[in-house]
Amino acid sequence: MIRPVATISATLPFAFAVLGLAVSGLSAAADAPAKAPLPPPVIERVPAGGVATPITPAPVVDRVLRGQYLVNTGGCGDCHTPWKIGKNGPEPDASRLLSGHPQSLAMPPAPKLPAGPWTVVVSATNTAWSGPWGVSFTANLTPDVETGLGGWTARQFADTMRTGKHLGGGREVLPPMPIPAYKHFNDADLDAIFAYLRAIPAVKNRVPAPLPPAPAAASKK
Ligand code: HEC
């Protein structure tokens, strides 16, 4: 039977609220920390077309949505989406979602910092970073084959995130890429993140290679 979408979207949140109550009641009784499963994203499960979908959606949809959630909460866009000045100040440019340092923005040499506790300089786009490691540019994470992750396998992505080495065995992935935090993602998380990165629009944008730290003599000028 196909039920009207309105009924389903109205009853689902209620059902989850009840489920949530039941779960928290149970765990309180057992005196254990609440370990309720994450509520599934209800809205996305009822398509605008009006056809009722099963409450358990196809796993691939689930993975992409979970990946989007992890990318949003993991702050990948803070560094991998170039920032622009919007109505309310600087904000990530959604039209260049996760496409990395813009190839059109050639950075001049980073300003020399005086001796003292300031160590890092960042571009207005939040995509070029100069610090003790040299200059790094955030990577293009879109599925473009030539300039993004289009040619990567899920395995290579997971190995990069886990080891902090390019494709799991190449050069060190430089700061400020938060490998020390992200290496704790589990397999399912990394799989979901990669599935989401495969689903976003491909953007052709060749990110420059990183630059080594300036020689000590040059920084004395
Ligand atoms: C604080 C800034 C920052 C955040 C947040 C960040 N990255 Fe990065 N990321 C970088 C920088 C900078 C590089 C380039 C490093 C280099 O060239 O060595 C990079 C590189 C990468 C690479 C390419 C590595 C390679 O070997 O080519 C991948 C993949 C990546 N990031 C994925 C992610 C994902 C997924 C997230 C969110 C879960 C994320 N990054 C969040 C700064 C960041």
Image (cartoon, rainbow, N blue to C red):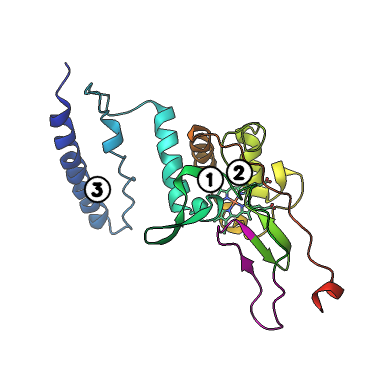
Residue drawn where x is 52% and y is 50% of the image: 81
- The magenta stretch spans residue 146: no
Residue drawn where x is 47% and y is 43% of the image: 95
Q: Amino acid at mark 3?
A: Val
Mark 2 / mark 1, whichever is N-terminal? 1
* Residue annotated with mark 2: 140
Q: Is residue 11 above or below residue 165?
A: above
The crowding category of the residue bearing disc 2, from other C-alpha atoms within 10 Å (few below 14, some 14 to 19, many at least 20), is many
For the residues marked 3 and 2, what is the alpha-carbon distance in whole angstroms? 41 Å
Give residue 98's mark.
1
User: Are the residues flagged by discs 2 and 1 in contact, CB closer than 8 Å?
Assistant: yes
Residue 37: image quadrant is: top left
User: Are the residues flagged by discs 1 and 3 in contact, CB closer than 8 Å?
Assistant: no
Q: Nearer the viewer, residue 79 or 88?
A: 88
* Residue annotated with mark 3: 23
Q: Nearer the viewer, residue 185 or 87?
A: 87
Mark 1 / mark 3, whichever is N-terminal? 3
- The magenta stretch spans residue 116: yes
Q: Is residue 47 above or below residue 184?
A: above
For the residues marked 2 and 1, what is the alpha-carbon distance in whole angstroms? 6 Å
* Residue 185 percent across, percent down from the top left: 53, 48
Q: Which residues are magenta?
A: 111-128
Q: Amino acid at mark 2?
A: Asn
Residue drawn where x is 61% and y is 36% of the image: 204
Q: Kindly tell me whether mark 3's CB lies below 8 Å from ligand 1.
A: no
For the residues marked 1 and 3, what is the alpha-carbon distance in whole angstroms? 37 Å
Q: Nearer the viewer, residue 90 or 64?
A: 90
* Residue 12 percent across, percent down from the top left: 19, 36
The crowding category of the residue bearing disc 1, from other C-alpha atoms within 10 Å (few below 14, some 14 to 19, many at least 20), is many
Helix or strand or loop: what does disc 3 sit on?
Answer: helix
Helix or strand or loop: what does disc 2 sit on?
Answer: loop
